[in-house]
Image (cartoon, rainbow, N blue to C red):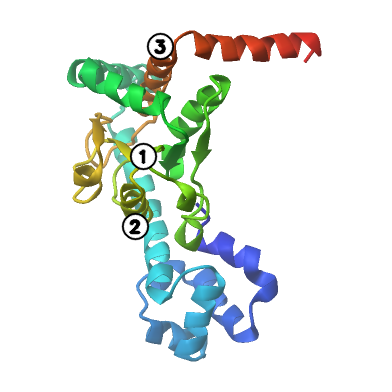
């Protein structure tokens, strides 16, 4: 997902003089800008409300509220990230092995996952993924990591998958073609984002099977998903690793391979034979 600053950089060549003044306010005062009303923005930049609205739309947002939400999301992520790291580091005194302590905690969370996720639930999810026309994958920020892991192996098994990397107006650029033969796998942690809620709503409307992997009791995503896999990654406010989500992604990958049977191994064999043939 591109940040507002990245979007500004990509659209710099098409911004008008007035819109560049709005962009300058964001560059100089990003934290305050996240709290501005459209009138505040116009006053600070010395432009009209309409110019601020056109600026938001030029960046690809439907309107000013979506631009403000993106600015606030970045502010929250920045504050949360450093506080999480600070809190976790404060728990390690000078004689504590950071690697040993941190890895030990991940082992505990992995064991908790093994004991709390029913095998029949994992098999049901693997069956859904294995027999989908297309598997759509969505994870924002670091949550994209397990998406990439699953996508890699689905490709090796000869299955079709798509990573949904767009946001805002670009969110549904590809997913608009999803249908009831598809499934969508969400990795969503911490906060319930608007993009995830919109995508869940769209995929549900299209009849796709929805699967949510999370550590949070979301108000809208959880009740809407057909399958929910809940995992533990540590206490609220601590630094959260992707170790458990990636381990779950790998476990699902193997469960999908088992569901596909010999065809999964055969697809990999064909690829290996082709590599050998061309000395790749």
Q: CA distance from mark 3 to mark 1?
A: 22 Å
Please rate how many residues cluster around mark 1, counting C-alpha atoms within 10 Å: few if below 14, some from 14 to 19, many from 20. Answer: many
**Residue 261 sits in quarter:** top left
Mark 2 — residue? 194
Q: CA distance from mark 1 to mark 2?
A: 13 Å
Mark 1 — residue? 186
**Sequence-first disc among 2 and 3:** 2
Q: CA distance from mark 2 to mark 3?
A: 35 Å
- 174 lies left or right of 127: right
- Of helix, strand and loop, which one carries label 2? helix
- 237 lies left or right of 36: left
Q: Position of residue 53 (x, y in %)?
A: 47, 81
Residue 144 in view of the camera: yes
Circles 3 and 1, Cβ within 8 Å, touching? The answer is no
* Residue at 18 percent of width and 20 percent of height: 116
- 131 lies left or right of 87: right
Please rate how many residues cluster around mark 3, counting C-alpha atoms within 10 Å: few if below 14, some from 14 to 19, many from 20. Answer: some
Mark 3 — residue? 258
Depth order, front residue of 117/2:
117
Q: Nearer the viewer, mark 2 or mark 3?
A: 3
* Residue at 52 percent of width and 86 percent of height: 51
Circles 2 and 3, Cβ within 8 Å, touching? The answer is no
Q: Position of residue 272 (x, y in %)?
A: 67, 11
Residue 244 in view of the camera: no
**Sequence-first disc among 1 and 2:** 1
Identify the mark at residue 74; answer none if there is no mark.
none
**Residue 131 sits in quarter:** top left
* Residue at 31 percent of width and 26 percent of height: 125
Q: Position of residue 56 (x, y in %)?
A: 49, 74
For residue 201, above or below residue 5: above
- Of helix, strand and loop, which one carries label 1? strand
């Amino acid at each position: 997902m591109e940040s507002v600053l990245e979007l500004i950089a990509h659209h710099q060549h098409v911004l008008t003089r007035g819109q560049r003044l709005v962009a300058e306010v964001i560059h100089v005062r990003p934290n305050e800008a996240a709290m501005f009303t459209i009138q505040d923005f116009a006053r600070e930049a010395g432009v009209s409300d309409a110019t601020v609205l056109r600026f938001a739309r030029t960046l690809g947002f439907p309107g000013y509220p979506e631009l403000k939400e993106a600015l606030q999301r970045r502010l929250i992520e920045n504050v949360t990230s450093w506080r999480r790291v600070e809190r976790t580091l404060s728990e390690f005194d000078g004689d504590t092995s950071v690697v040993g302590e941190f890895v030990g905690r991940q082992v505990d969370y992995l064991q908790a996952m093994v004991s709390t996720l029913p095998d029949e639930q994992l098999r049901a999810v693997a069956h859904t993924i294995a027999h989908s026309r297309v598997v759509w994958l969505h994870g924002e920020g670091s949550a994209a990591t397990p998406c990439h892991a699953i996508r890699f192996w689905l490709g090796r098994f000869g299955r079709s998958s798509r990573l949904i990397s767009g946001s805002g107006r670009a969110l549904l650029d590809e997913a608009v073609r999803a249908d009831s033969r598809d499934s969508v796998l969400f990795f969503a942690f911490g906060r319930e984002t608007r993009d995830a809620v919109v995508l869940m709503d769209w995929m549900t409307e299209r009849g796709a099977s929805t699967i949510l992997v999370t550590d949070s009791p979301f108000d809208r995503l959880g009740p809407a998903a057909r399958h929910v896999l809940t995992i533990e990654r540590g206490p609220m406010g601590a630094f959260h690793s992707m170790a458990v989500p990636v381990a779950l992604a790998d476990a699902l990958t193997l469960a999908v391979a088992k569901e596909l049977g010999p065809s999964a191994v055969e697809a990999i064999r064909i690829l290996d034979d082709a590599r050998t043939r061309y000395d790749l």
